[in-house]
Image (cartoon, rainbow, N blue to C red):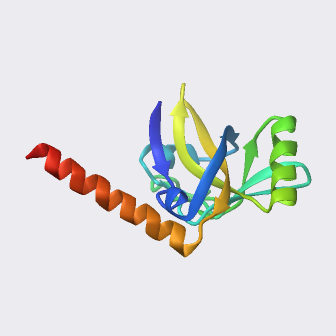
Amino acid sequence: MRIVATNKFANFNYFLMDKYTAGIVLRGSEIKSIRQNGMSLNESFVLISKNEAWLKNAYIKPYQSVNNFSPNPRRDRKLLLNRNEILKLKQAVERNGLTIVPVRAFFDKNLLKIEIALARGKKNYDKKDDLKERDVRRSQERLMRL
């Protein structure tokens, strides 16, 4: 498993709950660009419409060696999930007010997979608590080294 892209702000801005792995539908030379680390999941999210899951606002850099066909770098991409998983995600979003956030993209046996998670947004005081815990952990590690 080779990790291609991570959403660094997912853990900072959200409480991540259930995680799912989904395939993704790509066009043309997008996979070549992703293999050269040309993908970003920052500011992206997952939307469920008409019983299909869509990855919105994910950036895939256009492949440089392509002449005439280059898809839009921020186009919507379909996620491949089981129907039961889509229904669970849809119900959680509608009932509990959760959101679906892509956490990371990775290759699994030469296939690109996206790990998505149900997430609840953090308040500012939750983020401050996380920063305090991280600072305490860092200071403890420094003391352990000495």
Q: Is residue 34 above or below residue 84?
A: below
138 relative to 99 in the view: left or right? left
Q: Where on the picture, by quarter, is residue 121?
A: bottom right
What residue occupies the far top of the structure in this picture? Answer: 109
Residue 100 position, x and y percent, is: 70, 55
User: Which residue occupies 59% across, 71% down?
Assistant: 123
Towards the viewer: 75 or 47:
47
| Residue 27 appears in the figure | no
Towards the viewer: 94 or 7:
94
What residue occupies the far bottom of the structure in this picture? Answer: 124
Towards the viewer: 59 or 104:
104
User: Which residue occupies 84% across, 43% down?
Assistant: 88
Towards the viewer: 112 or 46:
46
What residue occupies the far right of the structure in this picture? Answer: 50
63 relative to 139 in the view: left or right? right
User: Which residue occupies 53% across, 67% down?
Assistant: 126
78 relative to 102 in the view: left or right? right
What residue occupies the far left of the structure in this picture? Answer: 146
User: Which residue occupies 26% across, 55% down?
Assistant: 138
| Residue 7 appears in the figure | yes
Q: Is residue 5 above or below residue 130?
A: above
Residue 15 position, x and y percent, is: 60, 56
Residue 114 position, x and y percent, is: 61, 43
Q: How many marks?
A: 0
Residue 83 position, x and y percent, is: 87, 37
